[in-house]
Amino acid sequence: MKVSYHGHSIVKIETGGKTILIDPFITGNELTDLQAADQSPDVILLTHGHNDHVGDTIDIAKRCNPLIIAPNELAVYLGWQGLNTHGMNIGGACEFEFGTVRYTQAFHSSSYTTEANEIIYTGMPAGIIFQAEGKTIYHAGDTSLFGDMALIGKRNEIDVAFLPIGDNFTMGPEDAAMAVELLQPKLVVPVHYDTFPPIKQDPEDFKKLVTAHEVKIMKAGDVLEM
């Protein structure tokens, strides 16, 4: 399995001959190494409806028809756009041919803003537990710190956790470091920082706060071999 990071909250997973994109905010993301027109994923996983996470989902899906897995209201909205969707909800899991997806809670908000500046409610925000090839990946989505992260860590032996550290809209470095203690992952990768002025952070500050777990600061295009 190959797991790569591509700026903001974009994570790509390659497993079993399938390519999975999480939160493909590419166009307008100055930190990514990707071009939307070059992406042909088999699956898109979405954590919530904000435009900096849904990103290029609609354009990519209209071109190559991936399966889009998303919180239910977001999946319904994307289905109305003619896309191939599978709606899920917090606490639910589903086994697919490429792996198992489970949605966890996240404490944030979730809406999609159309080109006409219409705000569409897209259900509850979520984190994602993805399991394949005997490995477990936790993508926290956008969230604050919450105590039940300890239960997520207890239920899942997390190989790598992608945690937001940008502050302002999500956890900052201090709360993200506390989240690591609750989750107990083998490896932590900070995400969702530096993309916009309100979320400018030095990831080294986060790394210094995490003293008992491995932290890997990934640049866009960096790959983990799992």
Image (tube, rainbow, N blue to C red):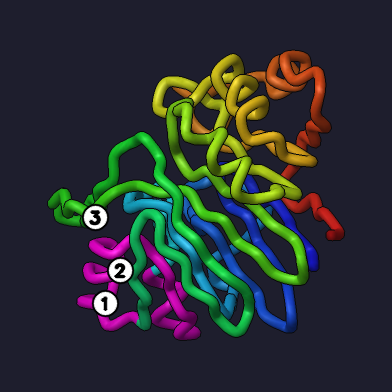
User: Could you tell me the amino acid type at mark 2?
Assistant: Ala
Q: Earlier in the sequence, mark 1 or mark 3?
A: 1
Identify the residue shown where x is 62% and y is 42%.
154
For label 2, the SS is helix
Mark 2 is surrounded, within 10 Å at the Cα level, by few (under 14), some (14 to 19) or many (20 or more) other residues, namely: many
Q: Quadrant of the C terminus?
A: bottom right
Residue denoted by label 2:
75
Which residues, given as a range, are shown in magenta?
58-83
Q: Position of residue 114 (x, y in %)?
A: 21, 56
- Which residue is at the front of the view, 135 or 21? 135
Residue denoted by label 1:
79
64 is higher (above) or lower (below) than 169 = below
For label 1, the SS is helix
The answer to whether the residue labelled 1 contacts the one labelled 3, judged by CB atoms less than 8 Å apart, is no
Identify the residue shown where x is 39% and y is 81%.
62
The answer to whether the residue labelled 1 contacts the one labelled 2, judged by CB atoms less than 8 Å apart, is yes
User: Could you tell me the amino acid type at mark 3?
Assistant: Thr
- Which residue is at the front of the view, 215 or 53? 215
